[in-house]
Amino acid sequence: MSYTFVLIHGSWHGGWAWQAVIRNLAEKGHHAHAPTLPGHGPGAKRQGITHQDCVSAVVTHMQQHGLEEVILVGHSFGGSVVQKVTEQVPNRIARIVFLDALVLEDNECVLDILPAEFAALVNHLAGASSDNTMLIPWEIWRDNLIQDAPDSVARAIWEQLSPEPNQVNLDKLDLKRYYSLAIPRSFIYCRQDKAMGSGYFHPRMSSRLGAFKLLEMDGSHEVMFTRPRELADKLIEASAD
């Protein structure tokens, strides 16, 4: 069976982050789209970008490309985006896959569920910027998000990251409709993910999904770079009934 994936990146990333995964999915006969969210990527307009702007861009991409029976994948911050996308086009989505992703409850914003120390850092860096954006510091990126990559690789990827428009983290999300939907859900847990501390993504975030299919793999928070082939396999496995 051939799947169509829509891969939604996390903070500071763009659609480019999925390139190696897309190649591996294609080798196995699957199709994948990886749109870059508004306010993300080099040269993007960041000021005034809201969470809904990100959601609307994904919905538009799916509609313009006529995508149906989609496996909608959210990584990290992208989890909050796929929740709202699912509300808007549930008839186009066959399954949602959360890859060590944020799962918000009704009327929460991203900063509500981040560890307090990390949320404070996000707000501090955004407040110190001229346009309410923040970029993850190199040391945190290296030691907590991509500790399984060689230093040169970690540095090269970090240099491709872009500041995040902080408003997307502050917008409260009405998720009542999302939680009324019966679309199948999967969660991929990366065993060595240190981004938010032990137990944060699984079981804390995953337990918010209700009934879901759990898959585990080795790797850090940034497995799309460090283990793209294995991640592609897990995405395929996560998509099956």
Image: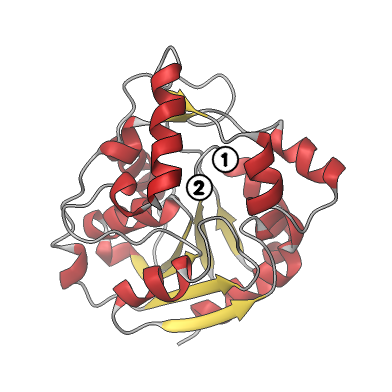
Measured as percent of width and height from the top left, residue 30 is found at 62, 67
- Where residue 61 appears, as percent x and y from the top left, is 41, 44
The residue drawn where x is 53% and y is 28% is 163
As displayed, is residue 204 above or below residue 19?
below
Q: Residue furthest front?
A: 117
Q: Is residue 95 visible?
A: no
Few, some or many residues within 10 Å of mark 1 (<14, 14–19, 20+): many
* SS of the residue under disc 2: loop
Q: Amino acid at mark 1?
A: His
* Residue placed most toward the observer, 113 or 34: 113
Q: Is residue 196 left or right of residue 178?
A: right
Q: Secondary structure at mark 1?
A: loop
Report if residue 136 is visible in the image.
Answer: yes
The image's mark for residue 13 is 1
Marks 1 and 2: CB-CB under 8 Å?
yes
96 horizontally vs 90: left or right:
right
Where's the C terminus, which quadrant? bottom left
Quarter of the image for residue 55 reads top left
Task: Tell me: 199 left or right of 216.
Answer: left
